[in-house]
Image (tube, rainbow, N blue to C red):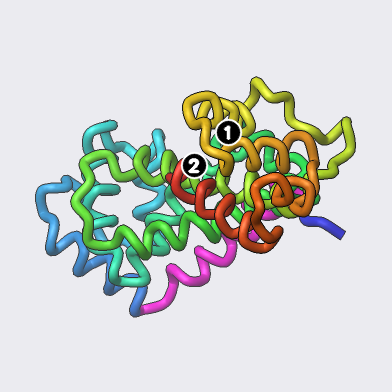
Amino acid sequence: MTTPCYDLFQLARDDFAAYSRRAESRRAIFLFLLRHPGLGVTGDLGPDDLVHRLTRRGGLSTLQRAAVLRALLLDAADPVLARTLLQTLLPGTTTVCRRLQFGRGAVDDPSEALATSWALLGDLIREWAGQDRPYAGPDLLSALRGRLRRYIITWRLENPSVEESEALPVDRDPLRDLALEVTHDTSPFARAAWARVVEGTSWEDLARPLGLSSAHLEGEVRRWVSTHLAA
């Protein structure tokens, strides 16, 4: 049984609320605000309080919200601050997933797409911790879109045969992005990626005219996808 998207968000909110009540969580926010007095955020706040302040109804201006997200990413080596940043950006993942049609075909349902996006976003935050990005929120969500797009294309390399009703039109993201790359890259690996993903050609049939083993070609195509469809 799958978990409806709204239940998934509620479960995340409930878990984060419990996490926020921990003394160490509240202390991490206290020290964070102490380090960044210019943010204009005051009070005895826990992580969930700060997330609320970062909503449109939280009383902060757009510039203030952007400054807080920038500071959170800068200090994201602290796991409490990393999780606070993740929780703040969870609503934005819905838009990202919707633009990618919730990974149609690559996952079983929208909830699985959301859960995958949250895991990838958490990885991004950990990798980018310490970076100074004035537009940290949009930058992270843009990079997430790239990683999800690559995730879908990689899945299709392994599972080229999908039902007609599940197939993405070639003028829609992410296949649109693959089509654009192939248009500008005439290498055999680009053409093989398209033939595998869109036409469902087997690795053996693709490798034979190139004089390569199917395993070798698959590895080269995966490297091509990672390079040309990078976040």
Looking at the rendered structure, which numbered label has been put on residue 135? none
Instruction: Name the residue: 41% across, 40% down.
Output: 55
Residue 43 visible here:
yes
Is 180 or 143 nearer to us in this picture? 180
Is 146 or 116 nearer to us in this picture? 146
| Amino acid type assigned to the residue bearing label 2 in the image | Leu
Q: In the rendering, at what x and y percent does residue 44 appear?
A: 27, 62
Pointer 2 with pointer 1, Cβ within 8 A = yes
Label 1 environment density (alpha carbons within 10 Å; few <14, some 14–19, many ≥20): many
In this rendering, would 200 be left or right of 213? right
In this rendering, would 84 be left or right of 192? left
Which residue corresponds to mark 2?
Answer: 229
Instruction: Name the residue: 53% across, 25% down.
Output: 180
| Amino acid type assigned to the residue bearing label 1 in the image | Leu
Magenta span: 4-23
Instruction: Name the residue: 21% across, 64% down.
Output: 32
Which residue corresponds to mark 1?
Answer: 178
In this rendering, would 102 be left or right of 46? right
Secondary structure that dominates the magenta span: helix
Q: In the rendering, at what x and y percent does residue 155 appear?
A: 69, 51
Label 2 environment density (alpha carbons within 10 Å; few <14, some 14–19, many ≥20): some
